[in-house]
Amino acid sequence: MIWVINLRVAMEPMRLASRVTGAVVALIWVALVSSAWGAAARPIRILALGTSLTQGYGLPPGTEIPILLEERLRAARVNAVVINAGVSGDTSAGGLARLDWSLADRPDAAIVEFGGNDALRGLAPEETEKNIAAILDRLKSSGMPVLLLGMMAPRNLGPEYGAQFNAIYPRLAKKYATIFYPFVLSGVAMDARLNQSDGIHPNVAGEKAVADRIFPDVLKLVARARGGTLGR
């Protein structure tokens, strides 16, 4: 009988150790599940960096391209926030100058739309390319996938300027392996029904048309962001 009692006493530390080990395993499992749930629940943050076309110049609030894209993503059951970092009148140099400030929200991906104001001012295409390349360099160094929206030069600047300017975007898209939409105003430019009275900025219908056209590429951008690390 004394032997049996001693055996029980001897076994008690082992039982206690087993309970402690089980509790630790349970805590680790809860932590892993909570972490996975948090990652899934956290929205993908997309930085929309650009000019008045991104900002929504002359439009009622809620009709800007970033808002429209966010609505489409949520309708597609993609938990995403599209940050409107468009500034009216901004050139590629201006976008580069404010890039670090724009990255303060720690986005997971970026849409880059610059060059329209450069062309309207007749700025040297090589300078525009240099500035956009610097922006893409910075985003690439952050491991951030990019959707590059191309622009085309106005025809009144002449064929030589147009050829030099229009070649910027496919060249940079190839160099940096970005997702590429060749002309952000495709199907909208020169259509009076889709533009404001200035003939340059899309109206509400025009913004919707742009958002609809680039949305498949935005979905590709989200796929790339999900393949990386969210919340850098």
Image: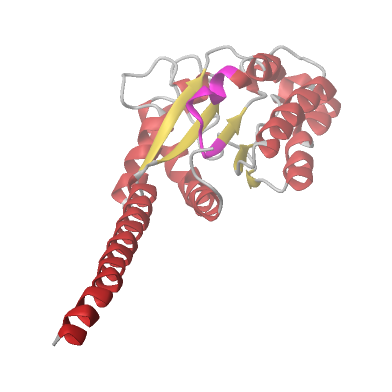
Locate residue 109, reporting x and y percent.
Answer: 54, 40
Quadrant, the N terminus: bottom left
Question: Magenta span covers which residues?
Answer: 101-110
Q: Is residue 16 magenta?
A: no
Image quarter of residue 21? bottom left
Q: Is residue 57 above or below residue 80?
A: above
Residue at 50 percent of width and 22 percent of height: 85
Residue at 64 percent of width and 22 percent of height: 116
Locate residue 120, reporting x and y percent.
Answer: 68, 15
Q: Is residue 167 above or below residue 96?
A: below
Is residue 15 visible to us here?
yes
In this image, 2 relative to 147: left or right? left
Q: Is residue 11 above or below residue 74?
A: below
Q: Nearer the viewer, residue 206 or 41?
A: 41
In this image, 88 relative to 82: left or right? right
Q: Nearer the viewer, residue 165 or 27?
A: 27
Residue at 61 percent of width and 37 percent of height: 149
Q: How is the image coloured?
A: secondary structure
Q: Nearer the viewer, residue 12 or 176?
A: 12
Locate residue 226, reporting x and y percent.
Answer: 49, 52
Q: Point out the residue furthest to the front here.
A: 2
In this image, 147 relative to 8: left or right? right
Residue at 81 percent of width and 23 percent of height: 125
In this image, 208 relative to 85: left or right? left
